[in-house]
Amino acid sequence: YVELAGKALRYYLRTGEIITSVSSRISFSEATGVLTCDERFVKCGASFVINLYYVKSVEKDGVVFTSGKRLALPKKACSPLRSCWLDYWFSGEEG
């Protein structure tokens, strides 16, 4: 997943590695647009883009990834994320 951290983007990889970009002068939506064009990625709240392929479950206050890592999210962001996640898996998308 990707997190907006101040004016930089922080990429959390499935390997556990975290890559932080240099300070960005464009909006978070613009910076992550190349990801959100892909059906696997969905913007969640104002500062996260989640890769649905690695989501194990969506709870009422966060998401659990297949790695076991839990990410707390605003409650209002979880219901739309759950819907996107279920749509993704029921559509048969992979990778």
Image (spheres, helix red, strand yellow):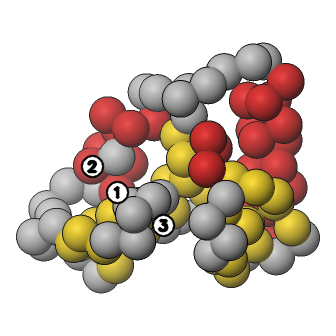
Residue 60 point in image, percent of width and height: 89, 70
Decide which of tag 3 and tag 2 comes sooner along the chain: 2
Q: Which kind of residue does numbered mark 1 sit on?
A: Phe
First of labels 3, 1 by sequence position:
1
Counting from the top left corner in percent of width and height, residue 5 is at 34, 78
Q: Report the side of 64 relative to 50 (left or right).
A: right
- The residue pinned by badge 1 equals 28
Most foreground residue, 86 or 5:
86
Q: Is residue 94 left or right of residue 6?
A: right
The circle on residue 31 is 2
Whether residue 60 is situated above or below residue 35 in the rendered picture: below
Q: Secondary structure at mark 2?
A: helix
Give the residue at mark 3. Answer: 47
Residue at point 14%, 62% (across, down):
25
- In the picture shown, does residue 28 fall above or below 23? above
Measured in 3D between alpha carbons, the distance from the residue under mark 3 to the one under mark 2, in whole angstroms, is 11 Å
User: Which of the two residues, 16 or 26, is positioned nearer the viewer here?
Assistant: 16
Residue 73 as seen in the image, left or right of residue 61: left
